[in-house]
Image (tube, rainbow, N blue to C red):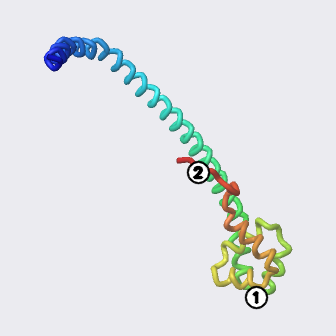
Amino acid sequence: MASGSAQAQEANASPKNSQYCTNIADAASDARFALQKQALADMEKEIEGRIKILEAKRAEYEEWLKRRNEVLEKADETIVMIYARMRPDAAALQLMNMDEEIAAAVIAKLNPRAASAVLNEMEPARAAQLANVITDAPKREKNPVRQN
């Protein structure tokens, strides 16, 4: 008997369960839509932040490229040919006493063999300083935080 009454209760509960599910379907759909809308808004904010970071990096690299081109333009071809024909020790002595950017520009325009010979004749600290000006990588943060 007990199983018969349990089946009768299930039969009565089944239409009620269906009706309940039907009644809350719109509310559940609205809640799901609100959650998705919020997730999309959060993603949009994150993307906008990343775009700002990328634009700042692009501007930084454009500035770096502009400075690099200005430095390279300072070395006139005639001056470069003069230093290319000098003995490395004499060229190194003169370039050590020049303005840092001009000396770096001249060395950058020399062929690699002549440039390495001239840098080899310089004080190591000055040669490293000029090499840093030639490469002139943009200043990087020491511990950049990576954003995923």
Provide the residue designation for mark 2: 146
* Residue at 81% over, 75% down: 125
Q: Is mark 1 on a helix, strand or loop?
A: loop
Q: Quadrant of residue 101?
A: bottom right
- Provide residue 88's location: percent of width, then percent of height: 75, 86
- Provide residue 139's location: percent of width, then percent of height: 70, 57
- Provide residue 32's location: percent of width, then percent of height: 37, 24
How crowded is the residue under tag 1: few (<14 C-alpha within 10 Å), some, or many (20+)? few
- The quarter in which the N terminus is drawn is top left
Q: Is mark 2 on a helix, strand or loop?
A: loop
Amino acid beneath label 2: Arg
- Provide residue 143's location: percent of width, then percent of height: 68, 55
Position of 113 compared to 104: left or right? left
Residue sitting nearer the eye, 128 or 98: 128
* Residue at 22% over, 15% down: 18
Which mark is on residue 87?
A: 1
* Residue at 57% over, 38% down: 49
How crowded is the residue under tag 2: few (<14 C-alpha within 10 Å), some, or many (20+)? few
Position of 46 compared to 139: left or right? left
Q: Quadrant of residue 135?
A: bottom right
Residue sitting nearer the eye, 32 or 86: 32
In this view, the residue farthest toward the right is: 97
Examine the rendered structure and indicate whether residue 6 appears above or below residue 45.
Answer: above
Rounded to the nearest whole Å, what is the CA distance between mark 1 and mark 2?
Answer: 48 Å
